[in-house]
Amino acid sequence: MSRPILVFDSGIGGLSVLAEIRKSLPHSDYCYLFDNARLPYGELEEQVLISGCVELVCDIVARTNAMIVVVACNTASTVVLPALRAHLSVPVVGVVPAIKPAALMSKSKRIGLLATPGTVKRHYTHELISQFADDCHVELFGCSELVMMAEQKVATGMLDMHRLAQLLAPVVAAQLDVLVLGCTHFPMIKAELQQVLGAGVKLMDSGAAIAKRVVTLLTQQNLIVEERRVTNEREAVGQSVMQAFYTKAEISEGLTTTLIDCGFSTIERITTTN
C-alpha cells in the first residue's frame, strides 16, 4: 500500500467527497475514518469536538502514514482545522460551503444554505456570505435531523419522504433558485432533496472543489500516484487499497455493504479516550 489519502468525517457523508477525489486520483490508496460514535458533530461543544478529532486523526495518520488529510465535514472544518494543522506535518484540507459559486450561478439572487445548526451559526459562515454573496438574499437553514436521515438511508435503504418534506418546507417557501448543501451528508440524499424541492432549485455541494484542491496540493509535493505498482493481488487488478475505520461499537449490515460496494477491503473499529 502506498501512502494513502485520509478522508475524515463524523459519518458516511465524507464518502461523497471521497468519490469525487477518486474521480481525479483513481490510482491512489484511501483511508476513510468516520467518528460515528459521536454523530452528529453539529451538537457537540467546540472543545469536545476539537480534542476528539485531533486524537482520532493524529492516531490514524501515524498508523497509516497518510500523505494528506481531508476533513470532509463542514462542522469540523469550521472548528478543528487550526488544531489539526498545528499537530500534523501533512497538508490538511477542509470543506468550504459553496457560497461563492452559488451566488454567481443564481439568477434570482435568492440562495440558501442548508447545513447543521453549528455550521449555520458560526462566524466563518457569515464571513463567507458577506464576502461572496453580498448581492444576494441568503436564507440559512440548520437541521441535524437530515444528517441522521442520510445515515438511515445508507443503513437501511429507506428514507421517510413525508418527514423530509416537512423539514424542507421552509426551504420551499423561501423560493430560492440555488441551495448550497453545506453538509457532506446531504449529497447522499440529493435525489430525494431534489424531488421535494423541484427542478427549479439547483443543488450545489463542495465535493468537486475539494478534489481539485487535493490534486493541487499533491501535485505541488510530487505525490500523485500516476499508476499502480503491482505488489499484491488487489493491486494487480488495478484497484486502490481502501481501508475504513469507525468508532461506534458496531455498524449496520447495510452500512457494511455500502462500504464494501465502495471498494473497502478493510473495515475496522477503533477506540478512543475522548
Image: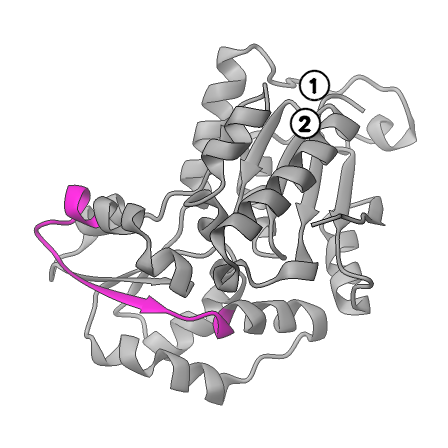
Residue 139 within the magenta-colored segment of the rendering: yes
Q: Is residue 209 magenta?
A: no
Residue 112, percent from left and from top: 25, 63
SS type, badge 2: loop
Residue at (74, 63) in percent of width and height? 255
Give the quadrant of residue 188.
bottom right
Q: Which residue does the image show at 63% across and 46% down from the upper left?
A: 52
Report the amino acid beneath label 1. Answer: Glu
At 22% from the left and 45% from the top, the residue drawn is 127
Q: Residue 173 falls in which quadrant of the image?
A: bottom left
Q: Residue at x 52, y 48 (%)?
A: 47
In the image, residue 201 above or below residue 62: below
Q: Which residue is mark 1?
A: 227
Q: What residue occupies the far bottom of the structure in this picture?
A: 162
Badge 2 or badge 1: first in the primary sequence: 2
Determine which of the numbered discs, if any, sits on residue 243 in the image. none
Q: How does the figure colour the protein chain or chains?
A: one colour
Q: Are marks 2 and 1 in contact (CB under 8 Å)?
A: yes
Would you place residue 26 above or below residue 52 in this image? above
* Of residues 32 and 89, the one drawn nearer to the viewer in this rendering: 89
Q: Is residue 98 above or below residue 251?
A: above
The segment highlighted magenta reads: 129-146
Residue 106 x %, y %: 17, 55
Give the residue number, with chain letter if any, for mark 2.
27
